[in-house]
Structures are given as structure tokens and as C-alpha cells.
Image (tube, grey):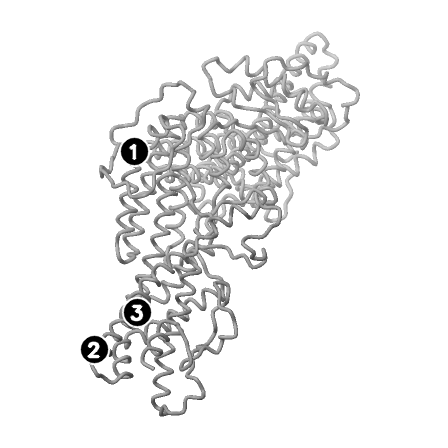
Amino acid sequence: MLHELLLSLLGYTGDLIIDTRESETLSSQTPISDECTFKLAPNIDFIDPSDRELIERIIALGFYYRELDRFSAKSRNLSWIRSSNEISNPLGTVSGMPEGKRENPSVYRRALANGIVEILSVYRSAVLHIEQLLLSETMPILATVTQGLNKFFSLLPPLYELILEIEHDDIRGGQLLNLLYKRYHCGVPELQTCIQRLLWHGHQVMYNQLASWMVYGILQDQHREFFITRQEDRDIENSSSHPDISEKLARLSTDDVSLTDWHLGFHICLDMLPEYIPMRVAESILFAGKAVRVLRNPSPSFQSGGAVYPQMPKSFHKIHGLAGRSQFQRVPVINKGMEEDLLPQSEADNIETMLLDLKESSEFHKRSFECAVDSIQAIAASHLWQLVVVRADLNGHLRALKDYFLLAKGDFFQCFLEESRQLMRLPPRQSTAEADLMVPFQLAALKTIGEEDKYFSKVSLRMPSFGIAVKSSQLDPPKATSSTDGTRASSKMSFEGWDGIALEYSVDWPLHLFFTQEVLSKYLKVFQYLLRLKRTQMELEKLWASVMHQYHTDFAKRQNDRDKCSITNEKRQRLRPMWQVREHMAFLIRNLQFYIQVDVIESQWNILQAHIEESHDFTELVGFHQEYLSALISQAFLDIGSVSRILDGIMKLCLQFCWNNETQDTSELEHIAEEFNKKSNSLYTILRSSRLAGSQRAPFLRRFLLRLNLNSFFEATARGVLNVVRPRPSLVLNQH
């Protein structure tokens, strides 16, 4: 009876102690029982009820041991390595196992099983010690067994419940770490020490994956258990949330997969992220790994550039200086010469050492983990900053975007609008709109862009709904279709058709990391707004030049023909209110243009330049640039629907006013003047409200309002609008 009891403690039943599941053949695939199946044989009647109860309590440990041992054997079984090579066989089965029953292996479960094996080995040693005591001395059997296994009554049942939950809910990866971390917080010191050891084994896997990711930029996660996961190709193709980005990066993936990886290749899987790792830390881990991937795999075109890049400032080089022990497995690197230059081996060893120190600690310290991740993220960000800012000449590209998207090269766009003025008087044609724009675009470039401007070749002009982009680098543009083509004749000018003129900027590796499609779309939004504003200002100035030319011509004729003098004077008196309206339009547009170009763009550009000089961190730089773009959009009122609609209406009214005057169509001029006065006064009323003028949203708005209302004209007419008084053109006052 003694040996049968001891054998039952190691999971072996017999005649005295039976297993109610003996009729089943236990294998690695047999599920874990929900309740203890070890019982005393019912035909044993010579044992007292009290002893029977104690024996059944003792033999329950044998049941727990067997189930834990079965779970460990199943989780540590490496036959899946061989089986994975046979999955693709024609029969579709592995080792006689039906495909539907094949389970997905888990490295985290295997690590947990290793920890359980350690605990079970201590348990077996305790059973062996009890056997030696009972064989060497005459001692009470049940009392000795109970006393020798006392601590396991508080260990094995919770472990059994743990593996039962893992099996039933198919818990793996980060979810398993999260479960262990929750079970760790208990009031039983022995159980807490046990769970801590199991958690240590699980963290060994996590640290190995972190080392592979943050030291080499390689995601070692065959079974999708890490909280950093690769986005599936089919998910990218079917994604409706990033259609523009997916289309843009699909063209680049064949040449440079790292750019696709940076934008859409990896993401944080919240299901596998342990709750004790904050989202901020997980994002830092994601960024560090992506940055290392970029640094270790430079683009071939970037390597062969042959350009001499400026050296980093000495203040930037902060080598962390630890020799580092190479305990993690080394992997071969690609582009070794350039890679070692972008990410020095000393820095890689430093990262590896920090992770190794965390790995060797017997307990997980959240603060130490977060500090190590922040340090690694800072190392990756600083070297990525060196790559993007210094080697790839980020500031030069930022200046080019300012020149062309923010119209800093005013002479180029002035020339372009003048060359395309006659073309834009007619609606764009579906088939040749972009080709028609190519001629004035190239002519403006020849007249204003010097050969030293190496960035202009990256600029393309396009009409989004009309076809292929017009490249600035095309040397032999086709001749434009004559603007007098009868098929393009129209009694009214289509202003909206040409409002879609857009620019594209060709961004090379690694600047795609900085100039994302979202960033370029913001630049495009500002560009289209500024181009329309400049076009409106130019048309108003051209109208005044045309009127002055006609006036001087009429004056010369009047000297020769005294009879028509009275008629000419009457015409001038009749049209004077209209010229006052034109002056009001030009006054508003000029001040708005000056406010955006000087008060907004130049001031924000200076702030950005100061940040670039002070910051040596890529993530900080991205944040500063986002603030720069957000400030441009908000201070130009492009994100306020009511204001942007009013400005849009004002520009359309100005263009329509110019068109009608040049075609001598005076039937709608009075209505246009009324609408302009109403919209301009509404604009002034909104902008001077305390919500805008009194906030930090637009710090230079008060200057703009002061220039508009220098003689209280806008304030007086705005008050009239609020009192439902609609000023007519004939009553318009001169501001000057």
C-alpha cells in the first residue's frame, strides 16, 4: 500500500488507487480533465472514513502532477519542427494526425512548461525523500506524507487551474505573460515565488524577441505571439483606411521594402500586449525596431550615391561605451559597410547589453524595463536623425517644399500664372489639361529657376482627375493646344476646374520616413489655397493695369476729339464705384496674402529651423514638423469650415469680377459687389471674435485685423451687416 500511494503521487494508478478515466487512452492530445479523477478503489472497506478522506486529498496531488507533466510534455514536444516541413505534402496530414486537430505550437507555452518541469522536479525529490524516510524508520505513513508534501498543497492546485485556463482559452504569447503577472499578485509567498519563476521563463522568450527586434531589426515571431506583428500583405491590399498610402508604397515595395515596412509593415497587436507594459513603451519598442531595420538595410541607391555628406556635430556623439556581451544569437547583416556606418557596432552592443541585464534579472522591474526601452529608443532615434537630417539633407528638402508648396519662390509662380493666364480663362479639357499646363510650367522654370536648384527636378505638376503627373524634369514637352480652340470656348469661365492644380514631390530613401503621404497631403492643401490666392491677386492687378491702359488710350483720343469728352466723363463717373470695389478686393487679398506668407509661414519656418538646430532626435523632429504644418493650416484658417468657405467665396467673386469687367459684362457687377461686401464683412466679424483673436491659435491675427481696419472701415461696414444693412457699390467709401 505504501508504494502504491507513492506511485500515485507520481501519476501512476493501480488496484488500490484508480483513475476513473482508465477506459480512455491518455495521449498528448487528450484534453486536461476538469476535475480530479484519482480515487480510492470503492471495494476497499478496511480504511477508516477519516483516513480515506486524507488519502484522497493526498492522491489529488498525484493527479495534479500527472496533468502538469502531460501539459509540459505536450508543450515541450518539438515534433512540430519536423511536422512543419511535411504540412505541404500532397496528403495534407502529419504523423497520422488529422489536419483539423493539429495545434499551433507556442514558444511561450514551451517556456512555461520549462518552469513547470523545474517545479515538478522539486516535487519528485520531495516524494523520493518521503520514501526514504518511510523505508528507513517506522513512522506514521499518512502523517509523514502529509508533512513532507505540505507546501505542494498550496502550489499544485493553483498551477493546475492555471494550465486548465490556458488550455481551455488557448492562451499564448503576451496573453500568457499577462495571465502569469495577474496570478503573481497573491497572498501565498510560496505560490508567488513559483509564479515569479514561471514569469521569468516567459520573459526570457520576450527578451530574446526584443533583442532580435531592437538589435538587428528582425521580427522573430513564427507563431504570432509577440506584441509587435507584421501586417499581412492581404490586409494591406484590402485595407480601406489607407488607400492612398497603400497605392503609393506598392510602387516602392519592389525596390525598397523597408519603406513599406516603416509605414504599414508592422504594428502593435493589443491582444498580445501585456497590461503591465504601457502603450507608450510599446510604441517606443516598435519605433526602435523599425529604425534599426532602416539603419541596417540602407537602400542600394542611397549607398551608391557617392555624395560627401557633412559630418555630425561633436556634441551629437554620445557613445554609451559598454563593451557588451554577445549572449544573443548573431545574425548575418546585409550591406555591412554602410550598415556599420549608420549603426556603429558599439551602439548595437550597448543595446544588447541593456537587454541582457534585464534578461538576467530574477524579477521583472517595470521601471528598469521602461528606462532601458527609453534609452534604446533614444539611441535609435539619434542615429536615424543623423541619417535623415545630415546624410539625406532634410533641411534642403524642407526648404524646397517651402519654395514650391508654400510659394516662397514667388517669381516662379508669378511667371507660371502669367504664362498660363490665357489657358486658365477656359475650362480644362479632360484629355489634355496636364499637357496644356506643361508649357507654361516649363517656360516659368526656364525663366526663373537656376541650374543650381537641384530640388526642382523632384517637383511635378498634376491635375488629379485628369491623368498622369506632369514631371518638371521632362525636357521635350509637347506643344500646348491653342487656347482659341472652338471646342474649349465657353461663355463663362470655369474657376473650379483649375482649382485642382496640384504639386507632387518625389521623395527618395530615407526621407519617406519623414515626408509621409499624410505630410505631403497637408503641404498640398496649403499649396492649392496659396496658389488660388496668388492667382486672384494677380488677376486683380492685371485688371487695374488694363483699366489704366484703356484710360490713357481714351485720354489720348479725347485730346483729338473734343466732342466725345462729355461721353467719356460720364462713363468714368458711372464706373467709379466698380473701381472702388476692385480696390477693396485687392486691399483684402493683399493683406491676407501678406499675413499668410509673412506672419504665418515665415514665423513658423523660423521656429522650425530653431528646433532642427537644437534637436538631435528623429521622433522629436517629426513632432516639431507636425506642429509646423498644423500651425500653418490652423493660422491660415483652413481647418475652420465657415472661414474657409467665406474665403473661397471671396476669391471666386474676385475672379468673376475681373472676368466680367474684361468682357464688358456689367449686368452682374452690382450683385458681385454686394456679395463681396457681405462676405468680407462677415469674414472680419468672425476673425475679430474673442474665440479667434483672443486665443493663441493665431498669434498674429491681431496684426492682420489692424491692417484691415486701419481707418475703421471694416468695423463700420461689419456693424452695418449685423444690422441687416446691405451696402451697395455706389455707397462704398474709399479706404485711402
State which mark lies toward you, 2 or 3: 2
Question: In the rendered view of the protein, which quadrant contains the N terminus?
Answer: bottom left
Estimate the spatial distance between the alpha carbons at disc 2 and disc 1, rounded to whole Å: 62 Å
Mark nearest the camera among 3 and 1 is 3
Mark before the other along the chain sequence, 2 or 3: 3
What amino acid is found at the position of numbered circle 3 in the picture?
A: Tyr
Name the residue tied to disc 3. Answer: 123
Choose top left, top right, bottom left or bottom right for residue 607. Answer: top left
Query: SS of the residue at dot 2?
Result: helix
Q: Position of residue 326 (x, y in %)?
A: 28, 40
Residue farthest to the top? 560
For the point 32% across and 46% down, the residue is 374
Residue visible at 29% across and 33% down in the picture: 345
Measure the C-alpha gap from mark 3 to mark 1. Answer: 46 Å
**In x, y percent, where is residue 206?**
37, 51
Name which residue type carries label 1.
Gln
- Sequence-earlier tag: 2 or 1: 2
237 or 413, which lies in front? 237
Instruction: Evaluate if marks 3 and 1 touch, with contact meaning CB atoms under 8 Å apart.
Output: no
Q: Which quadrant would residue 191 be assigned to in this image?
A: bottom left
Question: Disc 1 designates what residue?
Answer: 345
The amino acid type found where label 2 is placed reads Ser
Where is residue 665 shown, x and y percent of the image? Answer: 74, 27
**Residue at label 2?**
136
Q: Rate crowding at label 2 as few (under 14), some (14 to 19) or many (20 or more) other CA atoms within 10 Å.
A: few
Whole-percent x, y for residue 25 in the image? 51, 69
Circle nearer the viewer, 2 or 1? 2
Disc on the earlier residue, 3 or 1? 3
The number of discs equals 3
Of residues 15 and 605, which is closer to you in this image?
Answer: 15
